Each structure stands twice: as structure tokens, then as C-alpha cells.
Image (cartoon, helix red, strand yellow):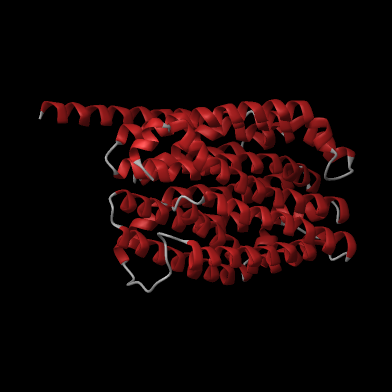
Amino acid sequence: MNLECIQNNKIKTILQFSIPSIIAMVLTSLITVADGFFIGNYVGKEGLAAVNLGLPIVYLFLAVGLMVSVGGIAMAGITLGSGDIKKCNSVFNQTMCTAMVATILLSIIMWLCLDPMLHVLNADGKVVGFFKDYYGIMLVELPIMVINASYGMFIRGEGKPQYFMQVNILNVFLNIFLDYMFVRWFHFGVKGVATASLLSALVTLCCILYFFIKKSSIYKFHGFSFSGKVLRSTLLNGSSEFVGEMSLSISMFAYNFVILKNIGVDGVTAFTIVGYIAYIFSMIIVGFGQGASPLISFSYGAKDHFLAANLRRITNFMVLIVGTVVLLLVSIGSGWYSSLFVKNEVVEQMVRSGIIIFAVSFLFSGINTITSFYFTSIGKAKESAVISSARGLVILLICIFTLPPLLGITGVWLVAPVTELFTLLLSLFFIGRERKNQMYKLEQRACL
């Protein structure tokens, strides 16, 4: 990674780092969509609803994993930019050990919480059975998924995003193939889908470990002395990502509670189907964020703060274009998409009427996400945490508990665009304040 090269080729460098990450993230999201396709077509709408009811568990794992890995890669990127390779490598090893221990403990805790969660949601019938079948296996798979994603961030930080993209391509095709075999031919239902995810994650882990054992040039496995200071800095730098994903976990639980209460299982199923598009889009944006973050951290660590800000502006413009394109595609293909997962007229009508309203949020959510990534990358966790908590918890929960009860299913679709619009105002405020701070520091140095 070279500062002059980044400065002279900002757009090209962002794309070089982001495109492999975007492909990897989209491929990862396609696994979820493929799972939904097989569950919806071969199990039924109750199966889709059951999987969606457990999404707070998935987001909880992502919250812990991202807090550790994003915080760790930010620290590693800054130390790499300053030339301290030894410390950079120690951060890598401690980060991965922390992620492993944390997610295994979380699996044990969540195993004990499955029944209480179903009780609070007041779920019953087939949904309960499908929920336990699916997440009983996924609680083994989710720690492996988080560890794979964490390793992937360090592979990208080393400047080898293509390798992780290739591994993800293998993961996707293997997962879809196993979905087809276990569900279509062996009729294992939701257990088959979960088992396919587990086996694919294990194969992916083997490929990633091979990279760090044989191909890595910076990050190497070795013994390290645990540092409480590194752990605190890691968790602090990754706190905004934790807040963001934890907020998603809480808000998804609230979504399911409100939709079940006011609309029923059909509403949860429709929300799940619309959520697949939102998930793919969010993975594209996260891919941009993960691609730009090492560049921003490196530039900031090398004391070129204005280059870091410029990288953020360019990335924000890119995600705005992507959001506009996705909104147009959704508007054109809403009728076809509504019948892809289930053959139920009530659910299909809900999806057709709501997906375009929901997709308006894509115009704002990308900018909010990249801005949060930016503040994390430059070590300003407080601003990032405020943005993440606003869009993922505070504003979102207010909208969830007011709009659906007042407007029914239309209120469900309006929650996302209203939340992202108000969060955008907050993001612009923090960006403006950061710009003023940088200008003030520049003027002070000029006076000296």
C-alpha cells in the first residue's frame, strides 16, 4: 500500500479494493437468498417466517464479530501505515483469538435463549418447530461464519482481496449445491438448509487457514502476549459496528414483534422477502466500506487527513449511484420478484405494494453506512457509534412502534426510508464538523 499511489489513483484504488469485497459480500448475501428460495418453495411461508424470527440472533453474532474484527483491522491498518509491522501482526493474532472465544461463548448463551425468545414473540405451530430445527444447527455455523469474515478483513488489509473473493465464490456455489441436494432431493427441509451452510463454512475456513499458513506476507500465526490496552482499543474502535449490528438485532426483534401482533405470519413472510433485497444492497455498501476502510486508515495513519476525507467523499458518491440504480431496478421488477419465493396472493400483494417504498431508503442508507465506516477508520468511534445507534436503534425503534400501528403494512415499509433520511441529517452534521476541525488544524500549522 503506497500513499502516493492512493493519492494519484483514488477512484481506481477504491474500486480495486472494493470490487472484490463487494463481490464477496454479494455472493455471501446470495447464500441467504438461495436459502430463502428453497425454504419458500419447498417448505412454505411458515419456514420463511421462522428463519426471519431468528435474524436477531444472526445480527447479534455479526455485532460481536464486527466489533472485534473492524476494530482490530482499523488498529492494524493504522500501525501498518506508521511502519510498525510487529505490532500490526500482534493485533491480528489477538483479534482473531478474541473473535473465536467471544462467538463460541455467545453460541452457548443463545442456545439457552431460544425458548424464551419464542415465548416473547408469541410464536406457535409450525413456525416454532422450523425455528428450533434451523437455529439448532446455525448456532454451530454462526461462530465459523464470523471467524471467516474476520479473517477476510485481514486478507483484504494485506492487499489480497481477490483471494477472499475466490474463496467466497466457492462457498456460494457449494452452499447452493448442498441446498439443492438436501432440500430438493433428500427433503431435509430447514435442517438441510442449515446443514448446507455449516458444511460450506467449514470448507471456507480451511481455504482461509491455508492462505495464512502458506501465502500471507504480513499477517502470520504466532504466539502473542495478551494486551488489555489492545483489547480496549479494538473494542472501542469497533464499538460503532457493534452498536449498528446490535441495533439491527434489537430492531429486527421489534419488527417481528410488531408485525406478528398487527399483521400476522403473512406480514413477517412479506417482510422477509423484501428484506432479501435490502440485505443484498447492504452487503454492496458494506463491501464499499470494507474496501475503503483500509485505505482511509492508512492515509490517516500517514497524517494525510484530507486524503482520508476525499476517499470518503468519493465512496459516498459511488454508493449514492448504486442506491439509485437499485431503486430503479426494484421499481421495474417488483411484480416478478414478489412471486419468486412463495405462491401466496396475499403475501405477493404485500411485497408488490411495499418493496418500492422500502427501496427509497437505499438513497440515504449507503451514505450513512460509509460515513460510519469513515469515522471508525480514523479512530473516532463516538461519531460512528452515534450514527449507527441513530439509524439502527433510536430513530428506527421510534418509527417501528409508531408507523406500523398507525398505517398497517404501509407503515412497515415506511420505517426504513424515514429512519435513513433523519440519520442522513446527523451524518452531514458530523461530516461538516470534522471538515471544520481539519481546516482549523491546517490553519494552526500554517501560523506556526
Say whether residue 297 is left or right of residue 132.
left
Residue at the far left in the pictured view: 448
Q: Nearer the viewer, residue 215 or 108?
A: 215
Residue 205 point in image, percent of width and height: 59, 65
Q: Is residue 401 visible?
A: no
Does residue 17 lie above or below 63 as drawn? above
Residue 411, picture quadrant: top right
Residue 126 x/y as whole percent: 83, 60
Is 85 above or below relative to 307?
below
Quadrant for the C terminus in the image: top left
Where's residue 204, x and y in %?
62, 62
Write the residue at 39% across / 72% down. Answer: 222
Quadrant where the image shows the N terminus: top left
98 or 173, which lies in front?
173
In percent of width and height, residue 261 lies at 73, 47
Q: Give the left or right position of residue 129, taking residue 110 as reference.
A: right
Q: Quadrant of residue 195?
A: bottom right
Q: Which residue shows up at 78% across the image and 52% down it? A: 48
Q: Is residue 78 above or below residue 12?
A: below
Residue 433 visible in the current orientation: yes
Q: Is residue 181 left or right of residue 274?
A: right
Work out whether 378 lies above or below 430. below
Q: Residue at x 64, y 45 (%)?
A: 26
